[in-house]
Amino acid sequence: MRASLRGDHTPVAESGACALVRVNFSMVVTDFQIAARKVVSVNPATGETLRELECASEQEVHQAVARARAAQPAWSELGTRRRMAVLKEFQRLLHERKTEVAQVIAREAGKPYVEALTTEVIVVLDAVRFLIENAFHLLKDEPLPHGNLAMKMKSGRLLREPYGVIGIISPWNYPFSIPATEALTALVAGNGVVIKPSEFTSLVVLELASLLHRAGVPQDAVQVILGDGATGAALLSSEIDKLVFTGSVSTGKHIAQAAAARLLPAVLELGGKDPMLVLEDADVDVASSAAVWGAFVNAGQTCLSVERCYVQRKLYAPFLDACVRKTRQLRVGNGMNPDTDMGPMIHERQLRIVETQVEDAKARGARVLAGGTRLPELGPNFYAPTVLADVTHDMLVMREETFGPVLPIMPFDTQDEAIRLANDSEYGLAASVWTRDRSRGEAIARRIHAGTVLVNDVVSCFGISEAPHGGFKSSGIGRTHGRFGLEEMVRIKYVDSDRLPGMKKVWWYPYGRGFARQMEGLLDMQFARRATRRLQGLLRSAGIVAGEKRS
Ligand code: NAD
């Protein structure tokens, strides 16, 4: 058994690329080669290998899911309050180990240590706070009154039952907060959980599993399987009852097809191309600071990043100047250095996407006002925070997810034009509107096709545990976080209980003309517009109402 498979090791504070390595076993008869896939955890700031870990085989993935299934009933039978107590202990432990956890995140994902605290650790601590305050109330049985006169003898209630085993496939950009908030929500609802983290950030998720186990979640009720896309595909083909996937649109589409083939329910949290709309009455200083932070936090590798910025023409020049000045002041470096504002990108592939988009924009007439180049003197994966002006919707940088430190800014003339440009995208994760007039901002929010619209802020909705997170259009299906995220982790069962068990129902056999006339009367009584017709209906249906049927 691989130590990492059940997430029960204590991770070393250091770590992703996946490699196929050949392991030679000398055998008596002949040399035998086995292909063992490994995930290589790399510090993106330095290129240093932090750790090599074996990928779980397909068989091991299936075994992990079987163990989670076996462990789930006992975990569910504990009841919501006792599971909440375990979460509370997890919250205490995480708070105690916040520094170590944030350091692992900073080393393995490259983001500044302080961002690991503000965008990962706090988010998870607050998600537990939300679940402790709300899970019992939201998960308890709910009476369901109804208004169907013909069925007044029946009383109904809604039960929220755990699915069984929830598979979670997560990305590298928020390697702690994404799998943690999803796993905690699944667990509090009584599910078993198997997490397949990104191949680039295995160590962070092993740290998460270690804390959950120490808090009292049974070893098999939450497990981590390490590996790459093939390991994720193995989890998808296993006997999980639901999948929560966070990642790119292209992988999400593969997942959706495979899930559809076996009718596996799936939540898909996918990419974004979030627009920021700066109206003519916005505060340029505040909005430009938001644009710079929103575009460069986590080196732009945030699903909710400001990916496109539209500014009313009157403010365009001062807004560009402010963004360029503030961008040039950013200190780029290793995330472990307390002075660092922006760290490296995760890997070379992501850098190439950024380079391709910036080159395409330049070739089509965009101006590079800041950055626009790699920073090899800092390390292998650094790209300068970049401001582009005079961009258009013909450019890749305005249409495809960049997921890197690029802020493209485009002018607009009218409010309607800004809304049209914001909605001119296959994505619909989030958007922001900047104006001193809140009611105007909120009215515009209604016209934007996105799962979240922020008025006078960017990105931070992810830190509000009550707020549902998820997208429209290609940005995904379903929600995580808050009440709607919790609802995704349970099956709804309707229990319909008859108060008159000794009585046969009038709508059972035999039918007959008399019964049809009674039914017409019943329909008239309930739905006819005129009062006289309703009264006539009542008289015709009188037998039914009394439980008697005319044949
Ligand atoms: P990715 O799609 O490359 O990988 C995501 C996860 O899927 C990884 O764990 C990967 O190993 C796994 N995977 C890859 N191929 C698979 C397959 N065929 N079957 C099953 N699993 C497979 O995404 P990424 O590069 O890790 O993350 C960046 C993307 O995630 C961006 O597009 C970003 O916008 C998106 N994202 C979305 C949200 C959101 O909440 N909407 C949050 C964070 C990131």
Image (cartoon, grey):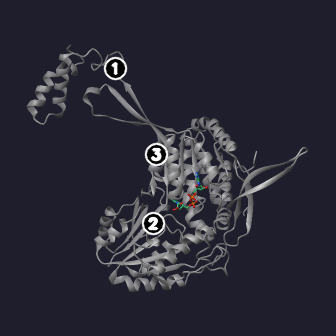
Q: Which mark is residue 316?
A: none
Please determine whether, in this image, residue 355 is positioned above or below residue 522. below
Label 3, secondary structure: give it: helix
Residue at point 40%, 33% (across, down) = 157
Looking at the image, which residue sits at the far left? 532
Q: What residue type is disc 2 on? A: Lys
Residue at point 62%, 59% (across, down) = 95
Residue under label 1: 500
Mark 1 or mark 2, earlier in chain? 2
Tag in front: 3 or 2: 2
Question: Do the residues bearing badges 3 and 2 touch, measured as CB atoms within 8 Å?
Answer: no
Residue under label 3: 487
Residue under label 2: 273
Q: What residue type is disc 3 on? A: Glu
Disc 1 versus disc 2: distance between alpha carbons? 57 Å
- Image quarter for ligand 1: bottom right
Mark 3 or mark 2, earlier in chain? 2
Mark 1 or mark 3, earlier in chain? 3
Along the line of sight, which residue is nearer the eye, 371 or 111?
371
Looking at the image, which residue sits at the far right? 28
Along the line of sight, which residue is nearer the eye, 389 or 138?
389
The spot of residue 109 in percent (x, y) is 63, 66
Quarter of the image for the C terminus: give it. top left
Q: What residue type is disc 1 on? A: Leu
The spot of residue 284 in percent (x, y) is 39, 81
